[in-house]
Amino acid sequence: MGIDLGRGQEEDRSCKALRGPWAGTPQHLDAPYWQTSEPLVDRMLDLAEVGPGDHLIDLGCGDGRIVIAAARRGAKGLGVDIDPARIAEAEAAARAAGVEDLAHFRREDLFETRLEAASVVTLYLVPHVNRMLAPRLSTELAPGSRVLSHGFPLRQWAPRTREFIDGHELYLWVVD
Ligand SMILES: C[S@@+](CC[C@H](N)C(=O)[O-])C[C@H]1O[C@@H](n2cnc3c(N)ncnc32)[C@H](O)[C@@H]1O
């Protein structure tokens, strides 16, 4: 008798196959380290109207600039990154900005991050990673939550807003 894999397990298996054997370790980046420029960070947060009462999660937070900018607007934030050097930089930057009570960081594989608490999720990843995340974004986020992506769309979703700024694309979706 064959093993009956549920749809979630099937997706999990194909996701692991796509990511390769080093997935989930600091030796494997699912997206390279590029930074969103400060003006683009501000524009993203304006688009999603981020403010007090929001809980923003940046999946692949780099030096923490998006979470720190959100904290300056009064929002709570969590940045996760697989690279411990990025987390050390982000924590130092949050302390320097005096927002360490609102801006938190964790070394973690973004595929393991629970999203239920977020009212805003930010992404600057690559197309196939966005595609793998899309089902989780639609099932784990509450209706009305906003998803922002710098660079790449979520193919399955029609954006609420799409902007092209200095050669960079920004997308905003609102979860139904
Ligand atoms: C393009 S950078 C974006 C940095 C930041 N969000 C920004 O917009 O400035 C992508 C980040 O994702 C991180 N990353 C790549 N794969 C990851 C994974 N599986 N889990 C967590 N972080 C990951 C990289 O270390 C890198 O810092």
Image (cartoon, rainbow, N blue to C red):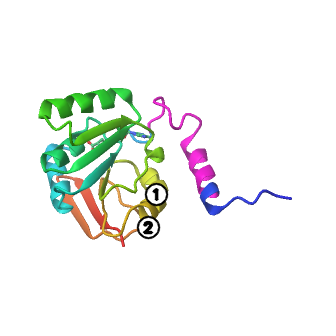
Q: Quadrant of ligand 1?
A: top left
Q: With respect to residue 168, does 87 lie above or below?
A: above
Q: Is residue 119 left or right of residue 93?
A: right
Q: Could you tell me which secondary element the residue under label 2 belongs to?
A: loop
Tally of numbered tags: 2
Q: Residue furthest right?
A: 1
Q: With respect to residue 54, does 83 lie above or below?
A: above
- Mark closest to the chain's N terminus, 2 or 1: 1
Q: Residue at x 27, y 70 (%)?
A: 160
Q: Residue at x 21, y 43 (%)?
A: 102
Q: With respect to residue 60, does 154 lie above or below?
A: below
The mark found on residue 131 in the picture is 1
The N terminus lies in which quarter of the figure? Answer: bottom right
The C terminus lies in which quarter of the figure? Answer: bottom left
Q: Are marks 2 and 1 in contact (CB under 8 Å)?
A: yes
Q: Is residue 64 visible?
A: yes
Q: Residue at x 37, y 37 (%)?
A: 81
> Which residue bears the numbered disc 2?
156
The mark found on residue 97 in the picture is none
Q: Residue at x 33, y 26 (%)?
A: 85
Q: Is residue 47 left or right of residue 22?
A: left
Where does the image place residue 7, in percent across and percent down from the top left?
A: 63, 62
Q: Is residue 33 visible?
A: no
**Viewer-closest of 36 and 93:** 93
Q: Is residue 140 magenta?
A: no
Q: Residues within 10 Å of mark 2 (few under 14, many from 20)?
A: few
Give amino acid for label 2: Gln
Give amino acid for label 1: Arg
Quarter residue 171 falls in: bottom left
Quarter residue 54 falls in: bottom left
Where does the image place residue 173, in percent across and percent down from the top left?
A: 31, 66
The magenta-colored residue range is: 10-29
